[in-house]
Image (cartoon, rainbow, N blue to C red):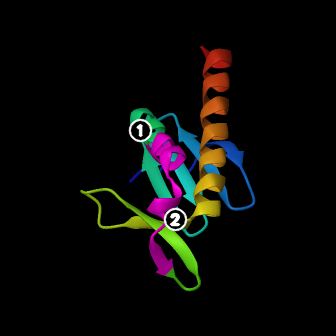
Amino acid sequence: MCDNLNQTPLTSSDNGMVYWCKNCRNFSVVYKTSCMMFNIRDYSSFLQLLNSLGKDDFKYEIGSQMNVILKNNCSSVGLSLTEEESQDMANLMAEGMLLYEANRLITT
Ligand SMILES: [Zn+2]
């Protein structure tokens, strides 16, 4: 896990925040109670995964809501999201990616 305290904030919403760490070249995504790190390739794949979710994927009834559970094989921690949350998170991450690209064009 990255312990650089000077990560660059890329974007934020009511529910989350996306940071970029130029030391280890990873994104940190904080969304509600979760925090995840991704390299660039994994960030894009995870964003694609969020965008590819359909109604049928939200099959776990938690409380009174239907959730999708996203879990990486090699991680003991996963995410449980409602359809609205998955779209919200996808919007946040898409915006983070755009701003990352924009920053990269300015600084290189
Ligand atoms: Zn770092």
Q: Main secondary structure of the magenta part?
A: helix
Element under disc 1: loop
Q: Which residue is mark 2?
A: 34
Q: How many marks?
A: 2
Give the image location of residue 71, x and y in percent: 35, 60
In the image, residue 30 above or below residue 11? below
Give the image location of residue 102, x and y in percent: 67, 23
Disc 2 + disc 1, Cβ < 8 Å: no
Q: What stretch of residues is rendered in magenta?
A: 46-61
- Amino acid carrying label 1: it is Asn
Note whether residue 65 is visible. Answer: yes
Q: Name the one closer to the observer, 88 or 59.
A: 59
Q: Residue at x 60, y 44 (%)?
A: 93
Q: Name the one closer to the observer, 35 or 90.
A: 90
Note whether residue 7 is visible. Answer: no
User: Furthest residue to the top?
Assistant: 108
Q: Quadrant of residue 98?
A: top right
Q: Residue at x 69, y 62 (%)?
A: 15
Q: Which residue is mark 1?
A: 39
- Amino acid carrying label 2: it is Ser
Element under disc 2: strand
